[in-house]
Image (spheres, grey):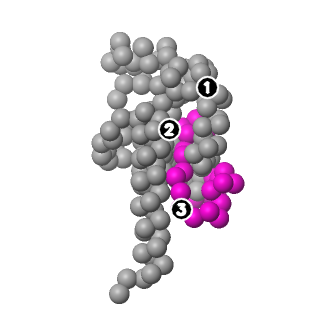
């Protein structure tokens, strides 16, 4: 007989995962595809590894909205990979985000001025923002660090 607590946690995790997918869809994210971590772009691997190391070292920080409220969507922004944020705090940080390629501001307080790349893993959304200039360069140059 399954452990009722484990069943409840699994149900909450599935609900948080569905919420993450819905949140990304509302923000204009396209249909997702499955991607093994070893095939992920370098920025995603680095963000994932940095967060995992911060958690292991007990150096990760968590938005207060995530503490004690049960499973929910967690956002890891590639610029600050040691910090886990709730959706609202992640959106509030938008004006302060910067392009990882050139380290300049993303050019807007919304992803419309640049491009926000997102990857969802269970109930974790990894995100990075690229400025319009780096998006254009990547489209023209296959060797640009933002390709792939």
Residue beneath the point at 64% across and 43% down = 89
The local secondary structure at tag 3 comes to: loop
Q: Is residue 66 left or right of residue 132?
A: right
- Which of 93/148 is in front? 93
The local secondary structure at tag 1 comes to: loop
Residue beneath the point at 52% across and 27% down = 111
- Let me know if residue 68 is in the magenta part: yes
Residue beneath the point at 50% across and 38% down = 127
In the depicted structure, whether residue 145 falls above or below residue 67: above
Report which residue position mark 2 lands on.
127
Q: Nearer the viewer, mark 2 or mark 3?
A: 3
Assign the magenta stretch its main secondary structure: loop
Report which residue position mark 3 lands on.
71
Report which residue position mark 1 lands on.
109
Residue beneath the point at 41% across and 47% down = 21
Q: Residues within 10 Å of mark 3 (few under 14, many from 20)?
A: some
First in sequence: mark 1 vs mark 3:
3
């Amino acid at each position: 007989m399954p452990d009722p607590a484990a069943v409840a946690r699994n149900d909450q995790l599935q609900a948080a995962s569905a919420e993450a997918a819905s949140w990304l869809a509302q923000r204009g994210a396209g249909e997702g595809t499955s991607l093994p971590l070893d095939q992920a772009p370098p920025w995603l691997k680095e963000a994932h590894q940095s967060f995992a190391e911060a958690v292991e070292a007990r150096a990760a920080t968590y938005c207060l909205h995530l503490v004690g409220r049960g499973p929910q969507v967690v956002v890891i922004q590639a610029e600050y990979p040691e910090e886990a944020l709730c959706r609202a705090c992640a959106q509030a940080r938008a004006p302060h985000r910067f392009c990882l390629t050139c380290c300049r501001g993303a050019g807007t307080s919304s992803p419309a001025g640049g491009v926000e790349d997102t990857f969802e893993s269970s109930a974790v959304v990894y995100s990075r923002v690229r400025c319009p200039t780096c998006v254009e360069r990547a489209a023209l140059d296959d060797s640009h660090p933002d390709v792939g």
